[in-house]
């Protein structure tokens, strides 16, 4: 799955709640530390409305919840929701195993764009 497939599919906003599991008591401090080190969206470079996304989904691999190498920063803007589109390929009940590569590709594409 890649960036192109992020525009395909139905949005299932309830899936985020349905797949949720109980977070570790350490999650908020790990999340804050991650955002301190990685303070921009990996896909578009924005600096606010940031989410810490699990590369290997938390509901499938809860043992990786606090592992730094399993985290990536993605934004949640209404107009360009990188968390939804890059991290979940447009569906909250899906995940993108290539999220790091796709985020890097999207950021490169944005940096090369020409504005008329």
Image: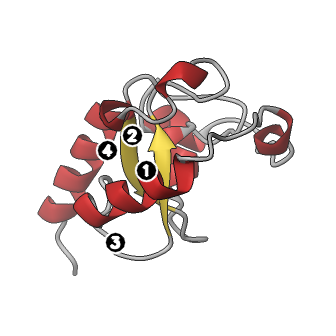
Label 3 SS: loop
**Residue 79 lies in what quarter of the image?**
bottom right
Of all residues, the one furthest to the left in this rendering is: 112
Instruction: Give the labeled residue for mark 4.
Output: 103
User: Where does the image place residue 108, in percent across and percent down from the top left?
Assistant: 17, 52
Residue at the image point whose x is 27% and y is 33% from the top: 101
Residue 12 sits above or below residue 30 on the image: above
Residue at the image point whose x is 39% and y is 40% from the top: 71
**Rendered image: mark on residue 30:** 1
Label 4 SS: helix
Instruction: Give the labeled residue for mark 3.
Output: 46
Q: How far apart are marks 1 and 3 (CA)?
A: 20 Å
Q: How crowded is mark 3: few (under 14 residues within 10 Å), some or many (20 or more)?
A: some
Residue 33 sits above or below residue 89 on the image: below
Mark nearest the camera among 4 and 1 is 1
Instruction: Give the labeled residue for mark 2.
Output: 71
Do the numbered discs 1 and 2 sit on residues whose CB atoms are within 8 Å?
yes
């Amino acid at each position: 799955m890649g960036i192109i497939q992020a525009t395909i599919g139905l949005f299932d906003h309830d899936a985020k709640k349905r797949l949720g599991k109980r977070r570790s008591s350490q999650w908020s401090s790990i999340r804050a530390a991650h955002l301190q080190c990685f303070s921009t969206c990996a896909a578009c470079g924005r600096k606010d409305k940031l989410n810490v996304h699990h590369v290997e989904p938390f509901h499938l691999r809860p043992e990786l919840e606090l592992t730094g190498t399993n985290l990536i920063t993605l934004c949640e803007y209404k107009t360009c929701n990188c968390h939804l589109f890059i991290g979940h390929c447009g569906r909250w009940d899906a995940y993108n195993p290539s999220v790091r590569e796709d985020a890097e590709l999207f950021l490169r594409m944005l940096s090369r764009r020409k504005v008329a």
